[in-house]
Amino acid sequence: MARMIDRRRALLVAALAAARVTSREPALLVVRAWLDSWRGIGSIVVGMARHGYDLSLTSDRDGWRATFLHRSHLIQPWIGQVLTWCATPWQAVQEAAWRAINAFPVEDCSVVDESPL
């Protein structure tokens, strides 16, 4: 099971990396065309969900905002909170997913009063 998760994560990271490349290579153009669509957004959302992230996608006059919040936010609210504004919904989702999947886990930095009183 762990091998399948690692393989799926590698494919997700590869797809998100391909979306960031500006080359005009035909193979990359095909991947970009798929990712720059509602179907591509759906594929990214499913991939991120497998890694514990939920998406919030919204728009206003400034553009589109995507937020991937890791499900462990109830215990550790600082993990996986990613916001970004973009011109298109797929750009917002790709950027937010890229940042979230590549974010290093943050250590618990909460202040605890350990005084005996």
Image (spheres, helix red, strand yellow):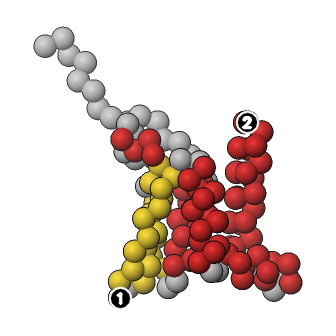
Q: Helix, strand or loop at disc 2?
A: loop
- With 117 as the anchor, is 55 left or right in this view? right
Q: Which residue is mark 2?
A: 1
- Residue 44: give x, y in percent of width and height: 62, 64
Foreground of the two, 114 or 26: 26
The residue that appears at 73% across and 51% down in the rendered structure is 8
* Residue 90 seen anywhere in this rendered image of the structure: yes
The residue that appears at 76% across and 76% down in the rendered structure is 31
The residue that appears at 25% across and 18% down in the rendered structure is 114
Q: Quadrant of the C terminus?
A: top left
- With 62 as the anchor, is 28 left or right in this view? right
Decide: is 112 above or below 61: above
Q: Helix, strand or loop at disc 1?
A: loop
How busy is the neighbourhood of tag 2: few (under 14 within 10 Å), some, or many (20 plus)?
few
The kind of residue on which mark 1 rests is Arg
* Residue 23 seen anywhere in this rendered image of the structure: no
Foreground of the two, 35 or 61: 35
Decide: is 41 above or below 9: below
- With 35 as the anchor, is 84 left or right in this view? left
The kind of residue on which mark 2 rests is Met
The residue that appears at 72% across and 82% down in the rendered structure is 33
- Residue 25: give x, y in percent of width and height: 85, 83
- With 43 as the anchor, is 1 left or right in this view? right
Q: Quadrant of the N terminus?
A: top right
- Residue 76: give x, y in percent of width and height: 39, 39
Which numbered dot is residue 96? none
Q: Which residue is mark 1?
A: 61
- Residue 52: give x, y in percent of width and height: 53, 47
How busy is the neighbourhood of tag 1: few (under 14 within 10 Å), some, or many (20 plus)?
few
Whole-Å distance between the Cαs marked 1 and 2? 43 Å
